[in-house]
Image: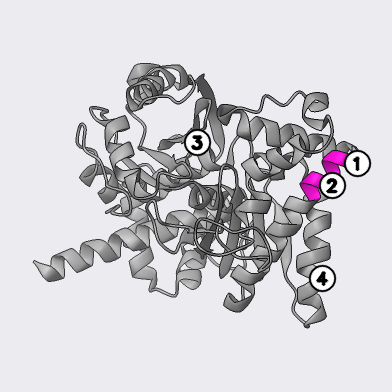
Amino acid sequence: MGTTGERRASATDTDTAILEIVRRRHETSRVEISRELGVTAATVTYAVKRLLEAELLLESGFARSNGGKRASLLRLNDQARWAIGCTIDADRLSLAGVDLTGALRARVAVPLGPSPELAEVGGALRRALTMIRPESQAHSATGIGLAIPHGFGDHGPELLQGLTDGLEIPFISANAPACAALGSFWSGEQPESGLCATVHMDAGLGLAILQDGRPLQLGPNSSASLDHVGIDPGGPPCVCGGRGCLHQYASARAIIERASRTGDLAHHLGLRLTDSSLSSDVVLIALAADRGDPRARDVFVAAVSAVAQAVWSATSWLGIRTVVLSGPGMQAAPALVGETMDRLFTARARSLGTEVSASVSQVQPHPCAVGAAVLALQTFMTPGRASRNGLAGAGVPAGQGD
């Protein structure tokens, strides 16, 4: 029994690796797959046969001849699987539907009331599912991924179970920064191999690390919080017992509080200053800063500068060379964020003889929603995984994808 289980797991891993290679290359041959994976041609042949029978791969013609028999080319059947990603913000629930290539095919947002209860969020999810595709097609999705919002922590699995109870679709969750990282990776913003860090700034500040395109750990705790990274030993006291923690300078709430103390800036920008408007208020500040408003620029650049300092502390010792920043505020002013990160992060590494890159994610409409759908694809898209997790109402607890 143990040997059979090991073989099945190995075959599933091979299938997943082949699908990823074909996705990246768009078209490729069995020979090229064998060479990249470092496995025998027979292993690839058997795996490709399984994937063709499952209609995940298609034959797409022949490669150029080099004097011998032309190799047949393979491509993804992008209509064979699709998945849904879900994010829960303070004022709305958003869904993104992606196909097997990770391309965005559908999106929908449903408003939420102030401080919504779980029942309201669950009802919004069910309405959104009927809107993103007809009901019969919504439940034909390969899976649904949920980006666990900031602050839920260990309650993520309970949230997931409560929201998806009764849905005839497999599901999985990960922390919002990990989902943002996956959305960025599948959109080609990160290298195909090695370590890459994604810093996600929204209600909180989180750091997710991918290795070869996979989160180092799944589940609600799949990213490290940067909220209590100390950046100023002489700063204000924090509830954690330290002083000068990052969230006191760069969280959404800190940015808005600083804007509120800056003359009539909050009134001038039309900030709502409510718990449900944290994200949209930060976007307004970032947009004004990007347009050159000096007061908004001072507020926003101070926050990004604090992030740059924390990112240096969190990544330099790991030898991470690529950093992607995401979140509504960051993505509203990419040039200004890039300029600040270059001055305080990449230039610092360069002075030590190390080349690093820092960029702002451009994944739209929501990197977390796209990444959550990608998580579902990665977890459920191989033939064996899809069937084992496809029971009506069954779910995969966070971090325990088969």
* Marks 2 and 4, the one that precedes in the sequence: 2
> Under tag 1, what secondary structure?
helix
Residue, x 42% and y 24% (percent of image)? 116
Give the spatial CA distance, label 3 vs label 2. Answer: 38 Å
Does 117 sit above or below residue 212? above
> Under tag 4, what secondary structure?
helix
Residue tagged by mark 3? 98
Asked if the residues shown at circle 3 and circle 2 are in contact, with their CB atoms under 8 angstroms apart, the answer is no
Q: Amino acid at mark 1?
A: Pro
Give the spatial CA distance, label 4 vs label 3. Answer: 37 Å
Residue 261 % position (x, y): 77, 38
User: Which mark lies nearer to you, 3 or 2?
Assistant: 2
Closer to the camera in the image, 290 or 402: 290
Per the image, is 390 magenta?
no
Q: Which region is colored magenta?
A: 295-301
In the picture, measured across the screen, residue 12 lies left or right of residue 145, that is: left
Q: Which mark is drawn over residue 294? A: 1
Q: Amino acid at mark 3?
A: Val
Provide the major secondary structure of the magenta segment. helix
Closer to the camera in the image, 229 or 78: 229
Give the spatial CA distance, label 1 vs label 3. Answer: 40 Å
Residue, x 87% and y 40% (percent of image)? 295
Residue 179 % position (x, y): 50, 48
Q: Which mark is drawn over residue 220? A: none
Asked if the residues shown at circle 2 and circle 4 are in contact, with their CB atoms under 8 angstroms apart, the answer is no
Residue tagged by mark 2? 298
Within 10 angstroms of label 4, few (less than 14), some, or many (20 or more) residues?
some
* Marks 1 and 3, the one that precedes in the sequence: 3
Is the image coloured rainbow, by chain, by secondary structure, or in one colour? one colour
Residue 202 % position (x, y): 59, 43
Residue tagged by mark 4? 347
